[in-house]
């Protein structure tokens, strides 16, 4: 998730003229990552440190519960897709 903020007055072209283009600043507030090692799939999430400090304890708890569900769903789905794309070879019992 990112936030885009235009700069005030637009960007400068360096020669004193305004280029008329807004400068975009992206801030990652929340990240969900899914990784795999062999058949093992791991899903994690992270919150921007300032956002974490700004949330009330009950809000952070609620977010943690919701993100636990999100990473569970995403990890499970990724694992399901992985098993259809790369099924176990026969005779490896």
Image (cartoon, rainbow, N blue to C red):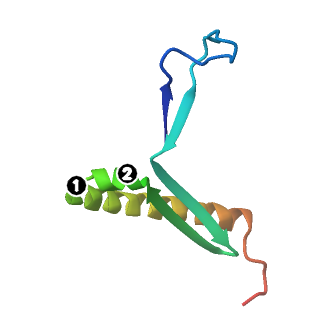
Residue for point 48% across, 28% down: 5
- Pick the front one: 59 or 6: 6
Describe residue 56's horizontal placement relative to residue 79 as left or right: left
Describe residue 39's horizontal placement relative to residue 26 as left or right: right
Picture quarter with the C terminus: bottom right
Q: Position of residue 7 (x, y in %)?
A: 50, 23
Residue for point 72% across, 62% down: 85
Q: Position of residue 53 (x, y in %)?
A: 31, 55
Mark 2 packing: few (<14 Cα in 10 Å), some, or many (20+)? few
The answer to which image quadrant residue 25 occupies is: top right
Element type where label 1 sits in the image: loop
Q: Is residue 76 visible?
A: no
Upstream in sequence: badge 2 or badge 1: 2
On screen, 93 above or below 3? below
How many numbered badges does the structure rendering display?
A: 2
On screen, 86 above or below 10? below
The answer to which image quadrant residue 81 occupies is: bottom right
Q: Position of residue 3 (x, y in %)?
A: 47, 35
- Pick the front one: 33 or 85: 33
Most extreme residue toward the bottom is 93
Element type where label 2 sits in the image: helix
Residue for point 22% across, 60% down: 57
Q: Position of residue 11 (x, y in %)?
A: 60, 19
Q: Nearer the viewer, mark 2 or mark 1?
A: 2
User: What's the distance in space between the residues labelled 2 and 1, CA to CA?
Assistant: 12 Å
* Residue of label 1: 56
Describe residue 40's horizontal placement relative to residue 73 as left or right: right
- Pick the front one: 48 or 32: 48
The answer to which image quadrant residue 77 occupies is: bottom right
Mark 1 packing: few (<14 Cα in 10 Å), some, or many (20+)? few
* Residue of label 2: 50
């Amino acid at each position: 998730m990112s936030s885009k903020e235009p700069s005030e007055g637009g960007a400068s072209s360096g020669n004193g003229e305004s280029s008329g283009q807004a400068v975009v600043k992206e801030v990652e507030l929340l990240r969900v990552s899914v990784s795999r090692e062999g058949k093992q799939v791991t899903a994690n999430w992270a919150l921007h440190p300032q956002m974490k400090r700004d949330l009330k304890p009950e809000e952070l708890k609620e977010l943690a519960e919701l993100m636990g569900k999100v990473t569970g769903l995403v990890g499970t789905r990724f694992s399901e897709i992985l098993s259809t794309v790369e099924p176990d070879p026969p005779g490896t019992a």
